[in-house]
Image (spheres, rainbow, N blue to C red):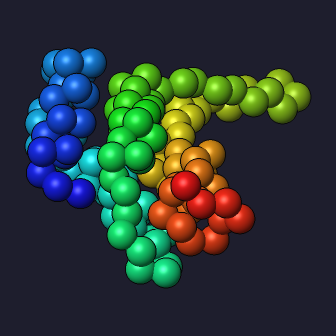
Amino acid sequence: MDESLKTEIIESTKEDFPDLSEERITNLLEIILLEIESYNTCKNDISWEKLKSVISEVLYKIIKNESEKTVSSVRRGDTTISYASTTNDVSELLLGYDDLIRRVIGCGGLEFF
């Protein structure tokens, strides 16, 4: 991904989360890009422009989940166990988009763009 597209994604994310440091946003973006590149098993050129909205959405979800931890509780008899649950694992969040990503890249999907 070229630097101008990265900068565009980072700037739009900073508008949504002004308190978050640019370094943190950049690190999360790099992790997302690395995970998407791991889908490219056939070594095709990746059309990052087509994947921009998916990348932005996953980045938004990661940051949102980090800031909002949900407390869940389980009751067993007279004991209640409470715990904070989060789903901010990049690979888990990309799972909903993996078929789309593979089709855009041209690896592992039945239809190509």
Residue closer to the observer: 92 or 79: 92
**Residue farthest toward the front in the current orientation of the protein:** 113
Residue drawn at 53 percent across, 32 percent down: 84
Question: Residue 88: image x %, image y %?
Answer: 46, 42
Question: Residue 56: image x %, image y %?
Answer: 36, 36
* Residue 55 visible: no
**Residue farthest toward the right in the current orientation of the protein:** 77
Above or below: residue 8 compared with residue 14: below
Above or below: residue 83 compared with residue 42: above
Residue drawn at 41 percent across, 46 percent down: 50
> In the figure, residue 82 lies in which quadrant?
top right
Residue drawn at 48 percent across, 63 percent down: 105
* Residue 6 visible: yes
Question: Residue 27: image x %, image y %?
Answer: 21, 50
User: Going by the image, does 78 lie left or right of 58?
Assistant: right
How many marks the image carries: the answer is: 0
Question: Residue 102: image x %, image y %?
Answer: 56, 62
**Residue farthest toward the bottom in the current orientation of the protein:** 42
> Quarter holding the C terminus?
bottom right
User: Going by the image, does 7 lie left or right of 54?
Assistant: left
User: Going by the image, does 78 lie left or right of 27?
Assistant: right
> Quarter holding the N terminus?
bottom left
Residue drawn at 53 percent across, 40 percent down: 87
